[in-house]
């Protein structure tokens, strides 16, 4: 009787594995839905304090969303190589504070971007426990801004011109949950751009800044 109770308890602890052959696939595909928070890392110009009436310039992050596809190449038991091209809709605001004649005025420049992103990532996975794994990822990303204002010729001071192409690195972590018919993975990633995106422009909104680099947080949900 004692042996029977022990066997029953063991059976209860060991769950039935969903998709037991899933990780044996050499290549598989999926799609991604995500929410991004996009910001700038600002380096002010050396002569910033000498610019008349301008007191501060700050970046405020905004929320956007991502849609993408996933191509996953199985390398080893705990390693995958992933290519995750996506389309990201994002916005960043630059807030300039001026003190003309001692009166505070604020000007906000909204910078919208529609990005085609091409991340290549290495995924390191823990061993599978029942129907889940934990993983970390690291990789590089190249992106193209489809609405870049780098080539806009306008006298409008509202324009802060950005270069069309960006590149950098990203790191993150997530969880793989094996469901009955597919694998679901919530994931968090951080991207740091390496390229100065600012285009030289004689207007005060650009000359007050030495460099603008991207910083993006992404919470995504993948279905594979």
Image (cartoon, helix red, strand yellow):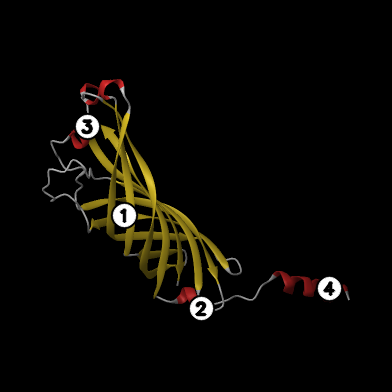
**What residue is shown at x 32% (from left), y 47% (from top)?**
92
Count neighbours of disc 3 (C-alpha within 10 A) and say few if under 14, some if 14 to 19, many if 20 or more.
Answer: many
Marked residue nearer the N-terminal end (2 or 4): 4
Task: Looking at this view, name the residue that lies furthest to the right.
Answer: 1
Q: Which element type, helix, strand or loop, lies under badge 2?
A: loop
Q: Are marks 2 and 3 in contact (CB under 8 Å)?
A: no
Which label is found at residue 167? none
Could you say where residue 158 lies in the image, as x and y percent from the top left? 21, 43
* Disc on the earlier residue, 1 or 4: 4
Of the two numbered discs 4 and 3 on the same chain, state the one appearing first in sequence: 4
Q: Earlier in the sequence, mark 1 or mark 3?
A: 1
Q: Which residue is mark 1?
A: 140
Q: Quadrant of the N terminus?
A: bottom right
What kind of element bears circle 4?
helix
Q: Which residue is mark 3?
A: 208
> Quick one: quadrant of the C terminus?
bottom left
Q: Secondary structure at mark 1?
A: strand
Is there CB contact under 8 Å for labels 2 and 4? no
The span from disc 1 to disc 4 (Cα, nearest Å) is 53 Å
Extreme-left residue of the structure: 153
Label at residue 21: 2
Given residues 146 and 167, the one toward you in this image is 146
Residue 113 image offset from top left, x and y in percent: 28, 54
Give the camera-side residue of 9 and 30.
30
Query: At 68% from the left edge and 71% from the top edge, which residue is drawn?
Result: 14
């Amino acid at each position: 009787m004692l042996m029977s109770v022990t066997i029953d308890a063991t059976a209860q602890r060991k769950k039935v594995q969903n998709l037991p052959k899933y990780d044996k696939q050499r290549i598989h595909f999926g799609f991604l839905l995500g929410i991004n928070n996009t910001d700038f890392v600002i380096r002010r110009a050396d002569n910033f304090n000498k610019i008349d009436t301008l007191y501060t310039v700050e970046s405020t992050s905004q929320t956007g969303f991502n849609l993408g596809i996933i191509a996953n190449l199985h390398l080893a038991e705990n390693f995958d190589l992933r290519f995750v091209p996506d389309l990201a809709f994002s916005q960043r605001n630059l807030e300039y504070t001026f003190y003309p004649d001692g009166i505070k005025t604020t000007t906000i420049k909204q910078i919208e971007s529609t990005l085609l992103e091409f991340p290549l990532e290495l995924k390191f996975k823990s061993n599978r426990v029942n129907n889940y794994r934990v993983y970390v990822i690291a990789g590089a990303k190249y992106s193209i801004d489809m609405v870049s204002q780098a080539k806009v010729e306008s006298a409008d001071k509202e324009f802060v011109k950005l270069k069309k192409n960006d590149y950098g690195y990203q790191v993150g972590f997530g969880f793989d949950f094996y469901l009955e018919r597919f694998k679901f993975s919530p994931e968090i990633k951080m991207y740091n751009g390496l390229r100065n995106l600012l285009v030289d422009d004689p207007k005060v909104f650009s000359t007050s800044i030495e460099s603008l680099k991207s910083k993006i947080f992404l919470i995504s949900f993948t279905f594979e």
